[in-house]
Structure formats: C-alpha cells, structure tokens
Amino acid sequence: MAFQFPVLSLMLLAPAVGALLTYTFAKKESSARIMATIISFIPLALSIYLLVGFLRPDLLALSADPLTGRYKAYEETLWIPHIQVFYRLGLDELSFSLVLLTSILSPLAIIFSRSESHRVREFYVMLLLMETAILGVFMALDFFLFFIFWELQIVPMYFLIAIWGGRRKRYAAIKFFLYTQAASLLVLLGIFVFYFYMGGGVDAFNMIAIIERGPIPLGVVQALLFFALLVGFGTKLPMVPLHTWLPDAHVEAPTAGSVLLAGVLLKMGAYGLIRVNVQMLPQASSSLFWVFAVIGTISILYGALVCLAQDDLKRLIANSSISHMGIVMLGIGASLFAFSNGSPGEMRGVMGMSGAIFQMFAHGLISAALFMVAGSVGHRLGTRNISELGGIMNRVPILSGFILMAFLASLGLPGLVGFVAEFTVFLGTYEAFGLWVMIPVLTVVLTAAYYLFAVQRAVHGPFNEKLGSIRDIAAYEIVPLAILAGLFVLFGLFPAPFMDLFSNWTRSLFESMGGLV
C-alpha cells in the first residue's frame, strides 16, 4: 500500500511553525538556539526517510501523483476553488536532491551560528523561515504555490543581510532585493502565459499537467517566454551578466546567510531553468541550447578569472560560485544538444544533464564549507584578506585543515564530490561538442591556481605577527565542517546511487521530450 502520511507537509511546515514557536516562547538566547536546532533536524530526518523510498522502493513505497506516477510522496488539496489553486506538493529525483541538500545545510548553518549575539531569537527565526521558503520552491507543483515560496525567500534573506550583515549591509541588501524582485516579475509573467495557455481551467496552475500537455504551439511566443524565464531564473543562478548582486550579498551576509545563499538559494535558479524552461518549453530549449552553453562557458571563465584578482577570501569564494554554477548551465546546454542531434531512439545527452544536477548538489555542500571556513577566518583572525594572513597552519591547525579540505573539494580533487560532478559534465560536453570542451576545461587550471595561491599565502609560509594571539575553531564550528568533509568523501567515493537517480530522471525527461522536439 502506498504511503499516505503527509510527510511533505510536515517537512515543509515544521521550520515555519518552529520559527513561530521560537519567537513566541524562546525568551533567552540559549533556548532560542536549542529550539531552532532541534526543529531544523525534523526536515533532515524526514528527508532521510524519503531517501530510502527513492533508493529502495522495494522497502518503502511512496505515494505517487495520479497523472504520471513520477512524483513521490505526492499531496494534493484544493486550496482556492474560485481560481483552481491547489496545495500540491511532490518530489521527483530532481527536486528531492535539492530538498535533501536544504535539509542538510539548514541545521548545520544553525549549529555553526552558535556565537551569534545580536538579536539572537530573530536571527534563528529568519533562518527557519528561509528553510521553509526554499523547501517550498522545490516541493511545489502548483505554479501559484511555487511563486508564493519563490517570493517568500526574498524576505528573510533581505533581513539576514540588512540586520546581521557587514559594513555595507544596507547597500548589499537593497541590491539583492532589487535584482531578485525584478527577476521575479519575469517569472510571474511566465506563469500568467502558462495560465492562459491552459485555458484557466482546473489544471491552469498544475505544473505536472503543463509539462504533460506539451509546449506552447507558437514558436515565437515560446522563444520570447524562454528568454524571459531565462533572465528571471538566471538572475537567481546567477549567470553573467546578471551576477553583480551576488558578491556584495555574500561579502556582507552573516556566515549562515552565505551558507544558505550559496548552498541552496542559487540552486533555485538552476531548478527553475530545468523544471520550467527545459520541461515546459522543450522546443525553445532544444533550439536555443547554445544560449545555455555559451552563457555557461562565459560564466565559468569569467568567475575563475575574477577569482585570480581577489584578496578578500569571502569575495573569492563568491565569485567561484559564479564559475561553478556556470558548469550547471553548460551541462544543460550540452545535454540538450546531444539529445536533439542523436539518432532516433538513441538516448544521448544523459551525462550532461545528470552531471549538472549532481553539480548543484556537490556545489551546495562545498560552498557551505567554504563560507564556513571564511567566516571562521574572519571571526578568529580579525581579517579575511589573504594578503594580511600567512603561516596560520601552526597556530590554527584544525581550521587550516578544513580550509585545505574545502579548497581541494572545490577545485575538483579526485575522490571528492566536486570531481565526480564536474567530470561528468565535461564528459557530457565532449559528447555534444567534441574538443570544444577544452575551453571550459581550462578553468580547472585556473581554479587550482587561485585556490593554491590563496593557500600558499594564507596557510603556509611565515606567520604574520600582526595577527597576534589567535585561537583555533570551537567544537560548534568543527562539527558542521567535519560532517560536510565526510559528505565530500562519501559522495566522492560512492556517487553511483545518486548518479543512477539523476540518470534515470534524465532518461525519463528525454523520453517525454522525444515527440516534442
């Protein structure tokens, strides 16, 4: 019998209810920390439960959507009858990987923020609200509900930057708000187009039904809609040249805000591109594959070159995210081109798309660790400028070890999670474009250069006596970093179960697109 317990609703609403409870009853800082930490583990526990259902459906059968059967733990209730809006939640392999990522990073970010002393209760409330909003984006299968969560996540992130940020926090918060709000208007425009395309009926906001019905027949309209959504979702990704809000937001945000921003909020843009642009506009996506590939390649190279000139450790990591998220776009474009140019019945392009999805998951883990170590460096040593550090290995060996681990994972060291994701995307790019893959592959050298150069100057060499007496990181910082380091190795050495999920999802995607492109 299919599993009927509303696991998705419990996972989604637990952080929001926890935020309300924390704000109402946690009068002391210590009680706010404890309550927020405990509540944040509820979605993680339920995600692990769902993971069993995805990996071993013979052990745990999850309820599926009635239309296609591809979305698991499906829940549906009529919400607003007059406009046929449904409370509709569900997960497939694509969305589940991002829900799992969010559920992992949220409690780790809360634990890592134990030293926060300014308006502590409100700080944890914002983190919990952020978790609910991000989970809602990945779970929602009704466009109305999707857009509510898409907009909702802007609010807590704005306040995290504006209240708990650095010296230029107001500027960074307003810039973040303006960029993301402008992008949201384009997403809303796209939702209206789909609504009228579906005739405003019972399935007008049903994302599953829109995908199954097939593309909008007018090629010009579909192309214009494709570009509008590309800008809307691409700003969140972010893709060049719509990326300029990101470094400022990262530099000024508190560490926990940067962890969630880079770890999962950026993935909302990539998720939207795959779920909406690719699945709902397959003709335009296949014809305009080169847009993904070109913008992805430019973002990869631009981000890496900018990193070479950075002195602020946090700004370096922020720009590296632009480069690594460009790999996601490249994988999508290569996958679409290889599939569209394959022989009838030939399933080409699976590596590109499955590698792009795995890159989202891998980058989420790695970027979280990178911003944690950057936050610890700034807090413990009083500066994040690489030129002002030096020789810290002997004074803070544990922190230095985690810096090395995070850097090696990000530059793609074999045996760690970043290597598997990037290598798969590059294989998919070679399958599609041949030796043109050498252009984005050049970033492997650039990435190694800026990370190793930073390590050489900051961690090794003579100690800068101007830093004075410094202490190594505390246990509450070690635990999240150790967990992330363990996940680097786990998914780096044993990626097959996840890669199988992503490959199967991609094959299903291409089978559904076979008669549409």
Image: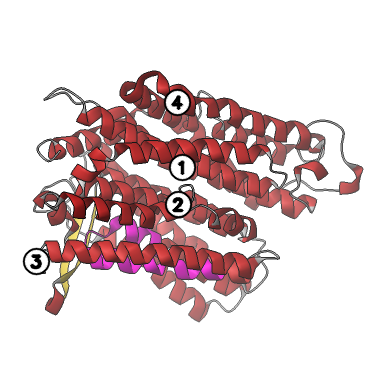
Left or right of 305? Residue 94 is left
- Residue at 29% x, 44% y is 94
**Looking at this view, is 56 or 417 the one in front?**
417
Q: Secondary structure at mark 2?
A: helix
Crowdedness near tag 1: few (<14), some (14–19) or many (≥20) residues, C-alpha within 10 Å: many
| Residue occupied by mark 4 | 493
**Rendered location of residue 65, percent (x, y):** 13, 53
Q: Is residue 152 magenta?
A: yes
Left or right of 83? Residue 257 is right
State the separation of the CA atoms marked 4 and 1.
22 Å
Residue 231 lies in what quarter of the image? bottom left
State the separation of the CA atoms marked 2 and 4.
26 Å
Left or right of 140? Residue 422 is right
Whether 347 is drawn above or below 245: the answer is above
| Residue occupied by mark 3 | 199
Q: Is residue 501 magenta?
A: no
Task: Mark 3 or mark 4: name the one nearer the start of the chain.
Answer: 3
**Rendered location of residue 206, percent (x, y):** 16, 61
| Residue occupied by mark 1 | 325
Q: Amino acid at mark 2?
A: Leu
| Residue occupied by mark 2 | 266
